[in-house]
Amino acid sequence: MTAVAPIRVLVVDDSAFARKVLRQVLSNAQGIEVVDTARDGLDALEKVSELKPDVLTLDLVMPGLDGLGVLRALDTLPDAPRVVVVSSAGEESELAVSALQAGAVELVHKPSALATDRLYELGAELVEKVRTAARASRRPRPVESSTARPMAAVEPPGPARNLVVVGTSTGGPQALTRLLSMVPADFPAPMALALHIPPGYTEAVARRLDALCPLEVREAEDGLELRPGRVVLARAGQHLKIERHGALTLGRVDRHPVQMPHHPSVDVLFESAARTWGKDTVGLVLTGMGDDGREGARAIRAAGGTILTESESSCVVYGMPRAVDEAGLATATAPLDGMMALLLAQLR
């Protein structure tokens, strides 16, 4: 039986203590080999060239060449390692979202002080995401940060006849960026998004999507109206559920059911959409690890609605769409660059 090669990881952080902690955590995990550590971006690029690791864990705030500079440099390499960002929320949230849009595969929230009592809590998540990154497709080309915001529609959209719900995980920030950069200003349906990302980052994601999309993009608030011209992003750590009150469609934000493995859960969002919008629901399942969204897709199809999945060819991780496809629940599938045209065809 052929032995499986270990995942070769380079740890990049300007903090000596952080490098020690991350190296120890990863070295203790089965099937992972830490080939070296790097203290800054230039050191990291030299060691990438020399050691050719499979995965980088990448700090963003470093002297000299920072994490975003490393990502830009990696984009020029033919077989660049996959990148897991290890970042603090708060002031670094915007940088972390920029890194995800620039091609980083995963994000791990680093405590502001890497205290020893947080070692194993951080470790389990880090090991899981390094393994996910190692299975990811080659980093897709980043979305240009200079993308201009399209002009607003001359006429506001009329009453909604459909609701669009979207679920994604690994590779999701970049997928949502590409999808929403293609949305027309007169898009006729409200849209709700569920993205697996650590708490503290969805407000920054919403702001960045809002800057490039002709529609208003907002982080979910309890009772916020979903209407044409608005995209609502589920708040990390909370579920987003859809309710209808007469002509109004509202988003509800809470943690129930608490036993779900993901908060927000794509299944919870999709199932609530199926209950409230039935056959007029269109669900999109984009790149992501795992099978969250499969049971929600089943509920939408049972209600007479439509499910679109991202093709394997454009997925960073063909996990969530695969689960839906293999269950026979997809109405149609398309690569990401063709998804908006496919979606518009379903709405019209």
Image (cartoon, rainbow, N blue to C red):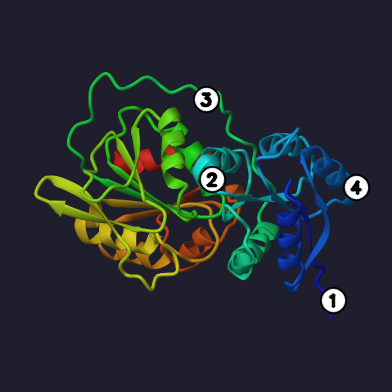
| Crowd rating for badge 3 (residues with CA inside 10 Å; few <14, some 14–19, many 20+) | few
Q: Which residue is mark 3?
A: 147
Query: On the picture, is 256 further left or further right than 11?
Result: left
* Residue 18: quadrant of the picture: bottom right
Whether tag 2 and tag 3 are in contact, CB under 8 A, the answer is: no
How far from the left and from the top, in percent, is residue 73? 75, 35
Q: Which residue type carries mark 2?
A: Pro
Q: Nearer the viewer, residue 50 or 143?
A: 50
Labels 2 and 4: the sequence-earlier one = 4
Q: SS class of the residue under badge 1?
A: loop
Identify the residue at image location x=34%, y=27%. 185
Q: Please determine whether, in this image, residue 339 is positioned above or below residue 154.
A: below
Q: Which residue is mark 4?
A: 50
Whole-percent x and y of residue 195?
Answer: 45, 52
- Cα distance, mark 1 to mark 3? 47 Å
Location of mark 2 (residue): 335
Q: Amino acid at mark 4?
A: Glu
Q: Which quadrant: the N terminus?
A: bottom right
- Give the amino acid at mark 1: Thr
Which secondary structure, mark 3? loop
Left or right relative to 223: residue 194: right
- Viewer-nearest of labels 2 and 4? 4
